[in-house]
Amino acid sequence: MSKKIRIAVQKSGRLSEDSLALFKECGLEFDNSMGQSRLLCEARNFPLELLFLRDDDIPRYVADGVTHCGIVGENVVAETNAAVRIVERLGFSKCRLSIAVPRGEEYQNITALTGKKIATSYPALLSRFLKEKGVSATIHEISGSVEIAPGIGLSDAICDLVGSGSTLVTNGLKEVEVILRSEAILIAGEKLDAEQEGLIQQLLFRIQSVQRAKRFKYILLNAPNSAIPAITEILPGMKSPTVVPLALEGWSSVHSVLNEDDFWNNIESLRAAGAQGILVIPIEKMIQ
Ligand code: PRT
Ligand code: ZN
């Protein structure tokens, strides 16, 4: 049997859709029935199969070698402390693990938690955090609906994942400490053979090309030739911008790539330098 890599993804939950979308963007094709009721699903055009699991099981299965890689929240890896390595941060499912207390409660600093009872599904991370801060509190481990614990008198505070923060607001809580910032990560086992490692590197190359493309835009503009040096300065591109003469004498079209992060700043300075008819287009893949 020829070698392939197995990657565990969450069967159904917040990570599932974005994980599968990432594989599609990387050009991997699967059967339509993917993820419905199956445990395993093989790619048609890459030596890779997906294993669908609950997210909590993924780090351990990767550490045990049942699967070579997995996509999971960094929070789960940190809590389980599994022997895996992070291959790449994937930029989706961003959240933070935070401590929250009832909104009306006075909170100056972390010493306010001394002697309190804190409900959480993340006892290991919470306990490490409290120890580092030298605070002694009681950890009450519960597996779900942590946010209702103070309201029903089960705890004085909670330690839970926060996304938009609206669950805290709905439950009359306020965020007071951030323990960990998390996002989806691609993890791999410590001991893989050279062939499996090679396949992971091929996949990683594709993932990075897709991710890089998301951070950049393709930009086209027209400018008088006299403005080209100033515009080149603002738009260095991957090597240097492409400059093509327009049919109109003394004018050119400039093509380049632009980082999404400083998009608006650059647009302003381009206009100031004499650029006109600016078009900004998404990039699908970007290979360096
Ligand atoms: O069934 P399975 O065990 O596989 O899934 P699960 O129910 O344990 O996990 P799931 O699908 O809820 O979350 C998977 C991963 O998504 C988590 O491990 C995080 O890495 C990531 N993630 C990102 C989140 C959130 N954002 C998030 N907001 N996980 C959970 N939440 C919950 C949080 O616990 C709280 O109840 O959403 C609520 C808060 O959301 P906001 O937006 O109101 O702040
Ligand atoms: Zn879970």
Image (cartoon, rainbow, N blue to C red):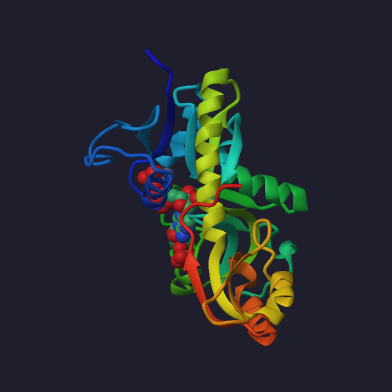
Q: Nearer the viewer, residue 195 or 72?
A: 195
**Left or right: 128 as drawn, with respect to 149:** right
Q: Nearer the viewer, residue 15 or 132?
A: 15
Q: Is residue 55 left or right of residue 182?
A: left
Q: Is residue 264 above or below residue 55?
A: below
Residue 237 picture quarter: bottom right
Kindly give the residue lying farthest to the top in the view shown: 1
Residue drawn where x is 52% and y is 77% of the image: 247
x then y, percent, for residue 269? 68, 81
Query: What residue is at 69 percent from the left and 64 percent from the top?
Result: 236
Residue 27 x %, y %: 39, 43
Q: Nearer the viewer, residue 100 or 96?
A: 96
Q: How many marks?
A: 0
- Relative vertical location of residue 42 with respect to residue 194 in this rendering, above or below: below
Q: Is residue 224 visible?
A: yes
Q: Is residue 239 left or right of residue 61?
A: right
Q: Is residue 73 above or below residue 234?
A: above
The image quarter containing residue 276 is: bottom right
Residue 5 position in % (x across, y down):
44, 26
Q: Is residue 12 above or below residue 248?
A: above
Residue at the (57%, 58%) spot, across then down? 96
> Quadrant holding ligand 1?
bottom left
> As rendered, which of 254 and 198 lies closer to the eye?
254
Which residue corresponds to the image point at 44% horizontal and 34% vertical from the top-left? 57
Q: Quadrant of residue 230?
A: bottom right
Quadrant assignment for the N terminus = top left
Residue 160 seen from this side: no
